[in-house]
Image (tube, coloured by chain):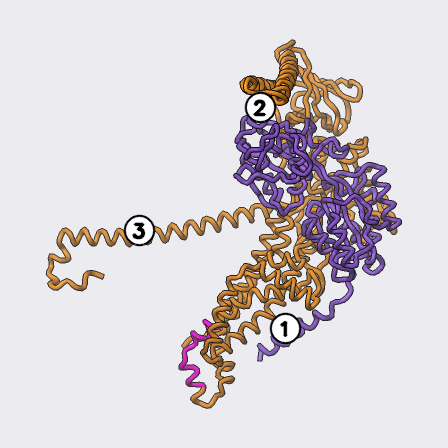
Amino acid sequence: MTDAASPTPDASFHSSEQAVARLGKRRAAEWRLKLYGMIAIGVAALALVALLWNIAARTMNAATEHYIAVEAQIEPGEDDFLRVVKKSARAAFPYVSGRSGKRELYGLFSDGAADDMRRAQEAGTLETGDAVPMRFLMSDTADLYLRGEFGVLETGATTGPLAITPEGKDYRLESGSDAFAQALGQAKTGLVREAATLRRQAARQGAGITTLEERLPGLTGPEREDTLAQIARFGAERDRLEGQASALDALITGDRQVRLALTDRMASFLVAVNGGILKLTEVSAGTALARPLVPMDGENAAPEGAWSLRILDRPEIGRPVKDRQVAILETLQSDGRIEEVANWKFFSLSDSTQPEIAGIKGALIGSLWTMLVTFCLAFPIGVMAAIYLEEFAPRNRFTDFIEVNINNLAAVPSIVFGLLGLAVFLNFFGVPRSSPLAGGLVLALMTLPTVIIAARAAIRAVPPSIRWAAMGIGASRTQTVFHHVLPLAMPGILTGTIIGMAQALGETAPLLMIGMVAFITAVPEGITDSATVLPVQVFNWANASERAFDMRTAAAIAVLLAFLVVMNAVAIILRKRFERRW
Amino acid sequence: MKSRNILAIAALAAFSATAAGARDEIRIVGSSTVFPFSTAVAEQFGKKTDFATPVVEATGSGGGLKLFCSGVGAEHPDIANSSRRMKKKEFDLCQSNGVTDIIEVKIGFDGIVIGNAIDSPAYDLTRQDIYKALATEVTQYGRTTENAFGNWSEVNPSLPAQPIEVLGPPPTSGTRDAFEELAMQAGARDAGLDKAAAKKVTVRSDGAYIEAGENDNLIVSKLEADPAKLGVFGFSFLDQNADRIKGAKVEGVEPTFDNIASGDYPVSRDLWFYVKKAHIGVIPGIAEYMTEFLDEDAIGEDGYAVEKGLIPLEEDELEQFQSAVTDLTVMTGEEELH
């Protein structure tokens, strides 16, 4: 508004230089306000997009799972399917031998493969025979490897033919080109790094000696003796470390033909040739010693282009999937024996300690039961309380006191309700621990104030004329409330209830006390069975040490959000049905 | 009216509460360190047998034993996991609440690792270094002063010249208890304090020790993001994240599976579980669950619990506890409890 107090609104008041400047300032202020608003919305939208993107991207990984096609030997009436998995794995990869080799082989398969067979047997659909074509679920770590979690195999540059000569169990590979130069470089870099580390450690010992010698003149008695002993220890350690470093230097700068070992702390170099995969263990310029991981068809020399060098940058020591497993997985993949299928099991299985067979069903049903109990208690009690307080209760100190308390209750931290639930429902009334009933009771207490406050506001918002009209034609107060006021207040009441329920759906703190934060694999069949809820499932998986639970945590969050959206949608539909205008 | 129906459902829900009586699944409470092993066993037990899968809650060792010792009956848990041995106080509490016959079973070890990001300098610590770096007050040669060390190289000149910043669990955690006892108090003893004085050693609160919550995954990602910091966490997290973090040597010993199993790595603790004998035969499956836990398939060298990061018992000790489980040997009160 312009200045209303101006006595003489002559033309110059609006067109003078000051007026133009004033107007410009006010417009700029308005423009700035709009800009701030847009920035605020932009920041909020950005945060939401980042959150959803983060969850969606990780959920996508959990949307599929990998299977390995194998032929299984299943006897009628088989009862140990874990053994079947191991036997089939051995039969499919007969060349894997030794204890650690077999462990690595079994490590590719999940226990879920045995579960699948057990379920098929129970359903009567399990085929038996010596070579039943089956698909076995892959283990979590192998699955993560295929998703590139531990680095991706890259192809190195190779030219010229490759000569292969057996040397004991290993093979000597010779290539005229500089094919192994990269590996040799890697080995040297490894040694240089190691020498540098040793030198750094030696230097620290040296620094220690200097520091202690500076301190020495001021010391007496046992402290001096201890310090002298420590100086001697540091000196010996420094000499030992420097000796080691010099020995490594000699290796690096020495004879060009020196053979350097590739350790598990360096990148892995695999050679794919003649249908097999060999791993380089020792290199020198032009030749290398290699251990077969997947055996070759023959030992013929390979012409240029018929062999390839594959490099995995991540050192073997730093990944749960070892080189042998990588070789087997690569072979399986090029044979087309790995299938990627949609992970519907996520919705039909419950919690597990193995990520690849962990599902959300138990928690989802648990949340449903808990929310049902919460709604059935909080909604009617809350609405009744609101109706009484708004329509019937006399205005006095007592009702004021109740109102203040309800408002305060809405601000009480949720963990307090958990403690209350433990003391009252569990210990006094004997409600079963971990049950949706106990959870629902506690969450209903937590939701009640929100429902009451929202319902009171909604009832108060119904115009008094509606009440007067109803009473004017002879309706009783009860009839007025239930026939006229409540239906009109319903949209507002539902909105408030949904806000309260949404809060309750995401709550874990009060459930901690009543034992719902637990590992429970059974799907609850009623409100007195043990159960857990969605946010607890998110919490438990986020705490697990297995990396594959990471994407399942994201998937569980996505399910929780979907649950919330469905709940809100139902409320909106109901609200639209009840909505009236006057 | 619609609201009348809803009211009826609510009333029904409230009444069904009283129908709760005996239960058919085992209830386990206790340590969050034992939780992953206990749940793995529970899951296998549920799959292999016709019994219901036990319900496992991670309440922490102290909280679990308190629940366990609160009485006999279906409303109290059957088994308590613990990342330390039961205390004398807890044993007495059990006795006074009628929990007289308790079967004590040791299941293995857990290593506590002090680690940092994989590309950061390697640390070679002694327990005395840890004590000097992290105690509120440091005693050297009989002089007690407030801890003024800011850099690792001040604590021990052969350590990297990096500020002392250690991420670790909060006081409610069993890992923190064990870290204080096995690393700091032992270090204080090495520095010449007597037993009573060493017991009083506390972790400094001036920002050098940063409480990072109970979630070890969080500590691992924070270490990755900040290479200058060290972190305190369980061995299984080092095992699972060997590509991102590495463990510091303690007393010259690297935190590896073999070193912890052999007892060479000094910061390791025993893991236990306790069973109420009075519940065996009342709650179905308890004896079978114990047998499954001590089976070679579970906590033997190649067992599935061992793959989760549990460090197994030596052969003869395993046999000793296997027979304790089959004979249902109960605690006498003569054990060396603290």
Q: CA distance from mark 3 to mark 1?
A: 53 Å
**Disc 1: which residue:** B10
**Disc 2: which residue:** B157
Look at chain A in the picture and name its colour. orange
Quarter of the view holding residue A379: bottom right
For mark 2, does the 10 Å Cα neighbourhood hold few (<14), some (14 to 19), or many (20 or more) residues? many
Question: Which residue is at the front of the view, A459 or B247?
Answer: B247
Q: Which mark is residue A32?
A: 3
Of the two numbered discs 3 and 2 in the rendering, the one whose residue sits closer to the viewer = 2
Q: Which chain is disc 1 placed on?
A: B
Write down the region rendered in magenta: A456-470
Q: Amino acid at mark 3?
A: Arg
Q: CA distance from mark 3 to mark 2?
A: 58 Å
Res. B280 visible in picture: yes
Residue A25: say if magenta: no
For the residues beneath circles 3 and 1, the answer to whether they share a chain is no
Look at chain B in the picture and name its colour. purple
Q: Which chain is disc 2 placed on?
A: B
The percent coordinates of residue A78 (x first, y second) are 86, 49
Task: Give SS at disc 2.
Answer: loop
Res. A491 visible in picture: no
Residue shown at the point (29%, 52%) measured from the top left: A31
